[in-house]
Amino acid sequence: MKRIFSLLLCFTILGCALNLSAQQNTTNDAWLKYNAEKKSEPLSGILEACIPLVGHAYAGDVKRGFVPAGVSLGGLALSIIGVFSNSIAAVYLGWTAYFGGRVWGVVSAINTANDYNANLRNKLNLSLQPINDPQMGTLGYGLALTVNF
């Protein structure tokens, strides 16, 4: 009877250990996949600043870059028309629209990469949750794995 109880206890402990190990590997696998597939916000901004629409393409959504690129292109066209028609107001308005569109494009590319990363975290069930200390209260935010059964 003692042997059966001892064996049952050993198998129970072994089963719990294997289950914890499987959950740990799932967490690590999710983080590895997230780190491999996430997009860099600064890189998408730099790419967008160099060549319009490239930062949005890197971030995974070119369509979001068409409006800022169109504003920049329209501003450039308006400033060229202003030069040929001797309208200084059109030149200033065109350059303002051009640079405004460029800045808008960079910010939009960074936000697009950030949205891509947030969607990837949601898909992998990774989330930011507050780190609580019973003595000091909420200390900050950290990454946690949410598992739904």
Image (cartoon, grey):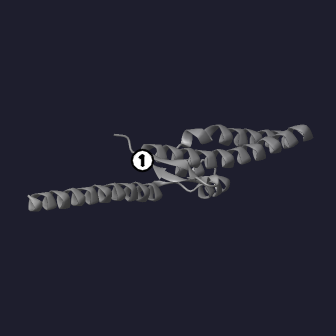
Front-lying residue, 15 or 32: 15
Point 86% across, 38% down: residue: 90
* Res 87 visible: no
Front-lying residue, 134 or 73: 134
Front-lying residue, 85 or 60: 60
* Res 131 visible: yes
Q: Position of residue 55 (x, y in %)?
A: 59, 51
Amino acid beneath label 1: Leu
Q: Position of residue 64 (x, y in %)?
A: 59, 39
Front-lying residue, 18 or 85: 18
- State the SS at label 1: loop
**Left or right relative to 28: residue 79:** right
**Left or right relative to 148: residue 106:** right
Q: How many marks?
A: 1
Give the quadrant of residue 5: bottom left
Point 10% across, 62% down: residue: 3
Q: Position of residue 50 (x, y in %)?
A: 66, 57
Give the quadrant of residue 136: bottom right
Point 68% across, 47% down: residue: 107
Q: Position of residue 141 (x, y in %)?
A: 59, 52
Which quadrant does the C terminus fall into? top left
Which residue bears the numbered disc 1? Answer: 124
Q: How would you rate the neighbour count of disc 1 (Cα within 10 Å): few for under 14, some for 14-19, many for 20 or more? A: some
